[in-house]
Image (tube, rainbow, N blue to C red):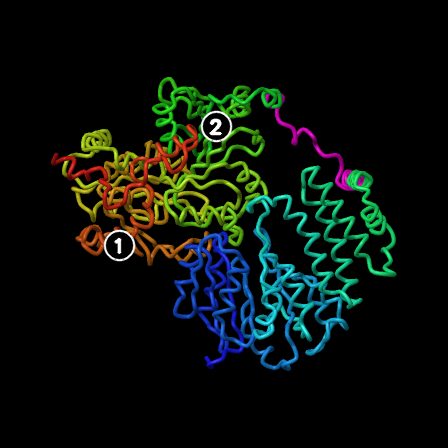
Amino acid sequence: MPETPELSVVVYGPNVQDHLPALLGPLAAQPPDGVEVIVAAVGDWAREAAEEHAPAFTVLPLPDGAGDAAARAAGAARASGRWLHFVHAKDGLPAGAARTIADHVASLPDTVDVLLFDHVRSSWRTSGLPSPDGPRLARAGGADLALDDRAALLGLAPLLGNRAVRAAFWRERERLLTTDDEPFAAYAALLLADRVACLPHAAYEVRTLRRESLPPVPPERRHALVERYESLLDLAAGRPAAYAVLYDLMVGDCLRTFARAGMPDGVAREFFRRASLAARHRRPDGHRRPPGLEGLRRSLLEQDSCTEYRALQAANRTRRRVRSVVRSGRRRTGTLLRTAQYRRALAEPVDPRLAVFSAYWARGVACNPAAIAAELARLAPGVHPVWVVTAAGAALLPPGTDHVVPGTRRYWEVLARAKYLVNNVNFPDAVVKRPGTVHLQTHHGTPLKRMGLDQLPYPAAARGLDFQALLERVDRWDFSVSANSHSTRMWQRAYPSRHVSLDHGYPRNDVYYRAGAAEVRAVRERLGIAPGRRAVLYAPTHRDYEAGWTPRLDLAALADQLGEETILLVRAHYFYETAASPSSPLAGLRRAGRIIDVSSYDPVEELCLAADALVTDYSSIMFDYANLDRPIVIHADDWETYRTTRGVYFDLTAEAPGPVARTQRELADILTTDAWHDERAAKTRTAFRRRFCEYDDGRAAERVVRRVFLGEDERTLPPVLPIEERTPAPSPEEATAS
């Protein structure tokens, strides 16, 4: 790179929903000549993502909470390039964008202060959509333009990312341009520039985050919109063409905000009043309103006729609804209504002493909800738990378990009245989030595979999913339980909403630190595992690209290779409930006594306690089992296919909890030598445990109950014990010796 780079790309801000790695990765992989990258990383998550590419970038760590303006200023101060391109950490750069910008600015005359270019638009549901700015840029033409001659350029999206600015110009005007109000800075840069240039090429990707994942906008921020435009109109004073364009932008933006922002009545009326004053007092001489409905809207705004404007809105909504009905036919209102019982129950008061629990789509008492319910009985016995269980599963419930069957009258009644709703998946779409209720999402595993919105690019995983409905369910969550910071971050990006992350550990994993030798021996006795025999738990996961479950291993051959002193505990994924049927691929092996089929055994935590080692592919059981600090072997025979079709968050083959086998022969070699439990295996397992067993210490359920049900402050909860100070349950060998 030359001593003075042509372009400094200043990436700034926090790692919102984990979008930063996708931005930095390509820049690091193929750094453009003549381009330097400065990362003003706000918060630890952004710093960690940037430091992975530290040799390629200059990383400026900034504290959590640092604003965008401060981050941009820090990056600009460190930058040495002739031009600056500010890129928010949530956004992206199309392939080759930095190189394209650098080449173009190198050819511009010194009189040009701002280069404008096109962008694409992405959101949680779309990617790379074209913007309306391309034709405007093409029509403007030229490489050395006066804004007064091309005032329509003010109609481009007000982003700092779709423009590069000459570094000397930015520093001269930095006092005016340093603001957390990005649209103001984007407009002001154009108004203050002597000359501008246009590049009708998409060189930026702006990402719109879900509104529901962002903090609510306070009333004063709504009023700031009017103040922004008035300040911009002051900057444009004496420039009639630019002033007129900005005035029209202000009126249109204010009317859209009033119509769509969902402001409380008092805030909305005050916003309308301020917008009306600005529309009247700032109206350019000789300015004519547009004809038709838009002209009527603007007239009502200038007259401060808020009530009449709302009546016009209501009439327009009614007309649109009628047209929609005519086009699509009469909708079945019955599908939009709750059952009669549910509607009546919703009118009753919320019961603060009622909690509804469910796990794995109402399969039974299991997983994190079961552990929380048990701790709730100890710490808050006055809260009555009711489990949602299918009719088939009800017969297997522990005696005395109060339960409801989905779809029954009492089912809808308890869902309507319970203050607490706890699930490791989601309650049905029809469930209403009532004021005063608490929805606790416990999840049921640490994510290796892509989840939630992150499944969108993977058709095999996304098939049949309604992502809008998913987000509406996610928006009901108040709390989300996490076992480690990896999960916390992935849940934020996969399920963007305002829920609070409970970084307290997985309650279902408490047993791995509380069970003693007697419990380990008792489980092995129930399973028929003789003392001294090695038990290997084989627990593969589901594959979206397979219709049913077939063992990926020749289990009979593997059992022969491992010898009589090893017993295989085989557990099919719970999606395949037929695994234990007489026609299952496991049936013949069961009858021959070569394995123990534990597909229907619950709870799975007991199987983990009984096993000397775990063999899995991509199942989240590996993250739970790692708490026991026992050997784990990964069988990844179809890793490339799984990674491509399902999507993953990290490369398991490079960051595995133990040895990785790509074939059955390799797996057998590992299990028949010391490789499954040697020093190298222990070292990789230790690193894996530090990363993924971060919050699991045996007191997760207690922390969750105290925080959610007892309302205790997070600072008063039992602290998470450092991993070095934890003592897992004894291994089967230790339990037998004790």
In the rendered image, residue 324, in percent from the top left (x then y), is placed at: 76, 41
Specify the amino acid type for callout 2: Tyr
Is residue 239 shown above or below 681?
below
**Tag in front: 1 or 2:** 2
Looking at the image, is 515 positioned above or below residue 86?
Answer: above
Q: Residue at x 71, y 57 (%)?
A: 229
Q: CA distance from mark 1 to mark 2?
A: 40 Å
Residue situated in front as seen by the camera: 624 or 82: 82
In this rendering, the answer to whether 399 lies above or below 568 is above
**In the rendered view, does 345 fall on the left or right side of 38?**
right
| Residue 462 in sight here | yes
In the picture provided, is 520 more to the left or to the right than 58?
left
Image: magenta residue range: 319-342
Mark 1 or mark 2, which has the lower sequence index?
2
Q: Answer few, some or many: residues within 10 Å of disc 2's Cα (few below 14, many 20 plus, some between 14 and 19).
A: many
Q: Quadrant of residue 281?
A: bottom right
Image disc number at residue 420:
2
- Residue 326 in sight from this viewpoint: no
> Dot 1 corresponds to which residue?
684
Residue 144 placement: quadrant: bottom right
Nearest the camera: 4 or 200?
4
**What percent of the width, then of the height, locates residue 137?**
70, 70
Please identify the dominant SS of the magenta region. helix
Which amino acid type is marked by label 1?
Thr
Give residue 639's mark.
Answer: none
